[in-house]
Amino acid sequence: MSMLYWQIGKRINQEIENKNHSEKYGKQIVATLWRQLEKEYGTSFSEKNLRRMMQFAEVFPDEKIVVSLMRQLSWSHIKILIPIEESLKREFYIEMCILEKWSVRVFQERIQSLLYERTAISKKPELTIRQDLELLKNEQKLNPDLVFRDPYFLDFLGLGDLYSEKDLETSIIAELQRFLIELGSDFAFLSRQKQISIDNRDYYIDLLFYHRRLKCLVAIDLKIGEFEASYKGQMEFYLRYLEKYEQVEGENTPIGLILCTGKNEEHVELMQLDKSNIRVADYMTILPSQKILREKLHRAVEIAHQKLNAKNDE
C-alpha cells in the first residue's frame, strides 16, 4: 500500500512538473483527480490523502529508500514522518523508531515531546549526526548521544513546587514504568539506593540502571537545584567503584547521569564531564507551554551549533 501511494504521488508530481503547470493549475488537477479516484476507489483517495501521497514522493524521491522504509514501517508511521521538514531530524526518528519498535501512538508522542531536540546528538555537527545515524543503520552501533536527553520530562510524578530529593526518588520508584519510558527503551532498573561500602563507610547511588544496547551500567544521581562542581567528584567515585567491583566481562565502562533542575552551560563545559563518562541534564516536573518549550529547545540547539562553528573558525 505504501508503495502504491508513493507511485501515485510520484506520477502526479511528474505530470505537473513535466507540463510546466502553474501552482494554480496543479491544484485544479488534484481537485479533479481526487474526486474521480474517490468515486471509483473510496475515501482513501480524498484530496487530503492525495496531497499526502504527493508530499511522500517529494520527501522520499529515491525508490530504493522507499522500499527499505516500507519493509520496516507501516503507512501510519510514514504519514507521521512526512511533515518533518529537516532531513536529519527525519532520519533520526526513522532509525530510532526502527530500533525501539515504536507503535504509531508512541511515535507521535516522541515527536510531540521534541525528542530529537532533547537528545544530545541534535547539538552535534551535521556530519557527526549523519555518521552516527549511518553507524546505527548499517552496523547497529548505538552512540550514547542518541540515548541520553536534556531535559527529561518528569511532569508525570505529580510533584509540586516544593519537594526533597527523597520525595523525587520515591515518586520515580512509584512511577517507575513511566520513568523508564521517558529514559528510553533498553533501560533496565537494577537498584534504588545502591549501597557502596569502602573502609567501613557507606555511600549510596540514588538509582542504578543497565542499558542493554550500550552494554553498561548507568548510575543516576538526583539533585535539587542547579548543578555544582562537587557533584562531579561524587559521580566519579561511584563510576570507578562500579567499574572495579560491579562491571562484568563484556560490559562497557559505566555512565553517570546527574539530574538537576538547572545548570550553567559554561560551567559544565569547563569541567569536561564527557572525559569522565558523566552527563548532566535538567529535569522538569512542571512543563511550560509547547510553544515556549519548543523555542527554548531550538535556541539551545542553535547556541550549541554557534559554539561549534566558533571553535572551527579559531
Image (cartoon, grey):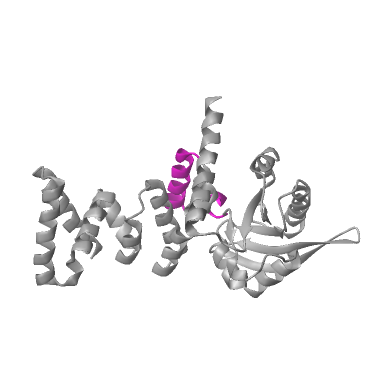
Quadrant of the image occupied by residue 274: top right
Q: Is residue 194 above or below residue 28?
A: below
Q: Is residue 259 left or right of residue 34?
A: right
Figure quadrant of the N terminus: bottom left
**In the foreground, 149 or 134:** 149
Q: Is residue 265 left or right of residue 87?
A: right
Q: Is residue 233 above or below residue 224?
A: above
Rendering coords of residue 9 (x, y %): 19, 56
What residue is drawn where x is 72% and y is 66%? 163
Rendering coords of residue 165 (x, y %): 74, 64
Quadrant of the image occupied by residue 30: bottom left
**In the foreground, 80 or 245:** 80
The secondary structure making up most of the magenta span is helix
What residue is drawn where x is 66% and y is 59%? 217
**In the foreground, 260 or 190:** 260
- Please indicate, yes or no, whether residue 60 appears anywhere in the rendered image: no
Rendering coords of residue 149 (x, y %): 57, 54
Residue 48 among magenta residues: no
Q: Is residue 193 left or right of residue 46?
A: right
**In the foreground, 270 or 195:** 270
Figure quadrant of the C terminus: top right
How many marks on residues? 0
Q: Is residue 181 above or below residue 228?
A: below
Q: Which residues are magenta?
A: 125-148
- Please indicate, yes or no, whether residue 27 appears anywhere in the rendered image: yes
Residue 138 among magenta residues: yes
Residue lying furthest top: 314
Residue lying furthest bottom: 174
Rendering coords of residue 260 (x, y %): 68, 55
What residue is drawn where x is 51% and y is 32%? 309
